[in-house]
């Protein structure tokens, strides 16, 4: 393998070997070193695309969607094609899982045809059941609890902007949801300080907070929970937000609009952060709700860089898990 950046060192090569055949269900299943290696690999893959054009030659990735998607679907398919393989879109509406076939049976059957599975699903226990039954790597394309591929793309974006993680402050403002969980875990793992500002009743899940506290102790990265968004963003290098109503929560939309109203990321909130603070969002975004149009489309916004980085980060994940 040829690496174009000096950051890829012998340790990274060993780490990549360690990823072979491994599932990516949540970031905490990896070590901080493995996460950093994936970021450096993604960075190299972005800069030296041609070096990897046959890395997964002839390999097949099944991409099961039980929820909507634009970025995850297209970036995974593009990633597979760029690596010399093929991504197969599998909508649960058209599959027998949509009519009650078990996820375990589906995993066993697909293992006979494919080299890897990516799934976007509801409960995290469902992806765990799939991974247990399948004998090929399973990658999490979002569950109700986590969105690890999003967080890897976010870390790559931070790395591109700052060139480092230590001493960088990431502030997530809004719903303590799947995106917040993975971002919190991922940020702390690479040594970035993390603050979460959520309204009462919409904080991060207690079991994820416990995991995050353990990682913060291990890496020395600061972890803070603040209710007041104005207080939270002081000294922020990045302000991140996500939708107030996630997929599957549509019935709560009205109550959520009220609860989250003081949590909009707008020009006033951004003005409290560091002068060069960047705005991040996993997308899709709702201008006028969680973010003002001015911030979303303004100079501080790196949201489309993040979206592109989904593909680069996932190429690293696919390479690590599936390279023969
Ligand atoms: N950020 C993200 O996962 O986008 P999609 O829902 O479009 O895949
Ligand atoms: N939290 C959002 C993320 C979408 C990419 C959801 O789960 O709907």
Image (spheres, rainbow, N blue to C red):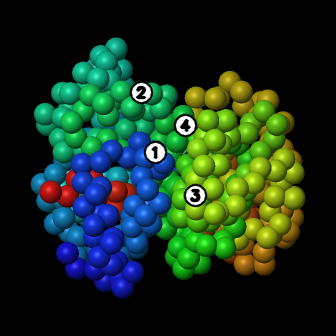
Residue 217 point in image, percent of width and height: 63, 56
| Residue 51 occupies quadrant | bottom left
The residue indicated by pointer 1 is 26
Residue 307 visible here: no
The residue indicated by pointer 2 is 126
Residue 287 point in image, percent of width and height: 71, 53
Q: Quadrant of ligand 2?
A: top right
In front: 104, or 309?
104
The span from disc 3 to disc 2 (Cα, nearest Å) is: 29 Å
Residue 11 visible here: yes
Q: Is residue 299 above or below residue 257?
A: below
Give the residue drawn at x 47%, y 32%.
124
The residue indicated by pointer 4 is 145
Badge 4 crowding class, 10 Å Cα cut-off, few under 14, some 14 to 19, many 20 or more, is many
Q: Which tag, 4 or 3, sits closer to the chain's start?
A: 4
Secondary structure type for disc 3: helix
Q: Is residue 68 above or below residue 16?
A: above
**The C terminus: image quadrant:** bottom left
The residue indicated by pointer 3 is 218
The span from disc 2 to disc 1 (Cα, nearest Å) is: 13 Å
Badge 2 crowding class, 10 Å Cα cut-off, few under 14, some 14 to 19, many 20 or more, is some
Secondary structure type for disc 4: loop
Give the residue drawn at x 20%, y 69%.
53
Residue 111 point in image, percent of width and height: 18, 35
Asked whether, in this view, residue 301 is left or right of residue 76, the answer is: right
Which mark is drawn over residue 235? Answer: none
- The residue lying furthest to the top in this view is 100
Asked if the residues shown at circle 1 and circle 4 are in contact, with their CB atoms under 8 angstroms apart, the answer is yes
Q: Which tag, 3 or 1, sits closer to the chain's start?
A: 1
């Amino acid at each position: 393998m040829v690496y174009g950046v000096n950051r890829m060192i012998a340790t990274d090569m060993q780490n990549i070997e360690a990823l072979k055949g491994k599932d990516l269900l949540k970031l905490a299943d990896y070590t901080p070193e493995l996460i950093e290696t994936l970021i450096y690999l993604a960075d190299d893959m972005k800069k030296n695309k041609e070096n990897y054009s046959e890395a997964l030659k002839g390999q097949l990735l099944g991409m099961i969607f039980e929820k909507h998607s634009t970025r995850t679907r297209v970036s995974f398919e593009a990633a597979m094609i760029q690596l010399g393989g093929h991504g197969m879109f599998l909508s649960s509406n058209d599959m027998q899982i949509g009519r009650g076939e078990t996820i375990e049976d589906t995993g066993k059957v697909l293992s006979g045809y494919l080299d890897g599975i990516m799934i976007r699903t509801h409960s995290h226990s469902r992806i765990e059941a799939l991974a247990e039954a399948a004998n090929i790597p399973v990658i999490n394309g979002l569950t109700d609890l986590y969105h690890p591929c999003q967080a890897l793309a976010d870390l790559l974006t931070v790395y591109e902007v700052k060139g480092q993680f230590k001493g960088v402050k990431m502030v997530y403002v809004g719903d303590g949801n799947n995106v917040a969980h993975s971002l919190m875990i991922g940020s702390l793992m690479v040594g970035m300080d993390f603050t979460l500002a959520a309204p009462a009743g919409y904080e991060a899940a207690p079991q994820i907070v416990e995991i995050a506290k353990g990682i913060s102790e291990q890496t020395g990265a600061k972890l803070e929970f603040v209710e007041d968004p104005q207080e939270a963003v002081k000294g922020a290098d990045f302000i991140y937000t996500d939708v107030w109503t996630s997929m599957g929560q549509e019935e709560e939309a009205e109550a959520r609009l009220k609860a989250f109203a003081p949590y909009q990321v707008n020009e006033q909130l951004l003005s409290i952060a560091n002068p060069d603070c960047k705005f991040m969002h996993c997308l899709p975004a709702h201008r006028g709700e969680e973010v003002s149009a001015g911030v979303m489309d303004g100079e501080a916004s790196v949201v489309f860089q993040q979206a592109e980085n989904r593909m680069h980060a996932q190429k690293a994940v696919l390479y690590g898990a599936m390279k023969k």
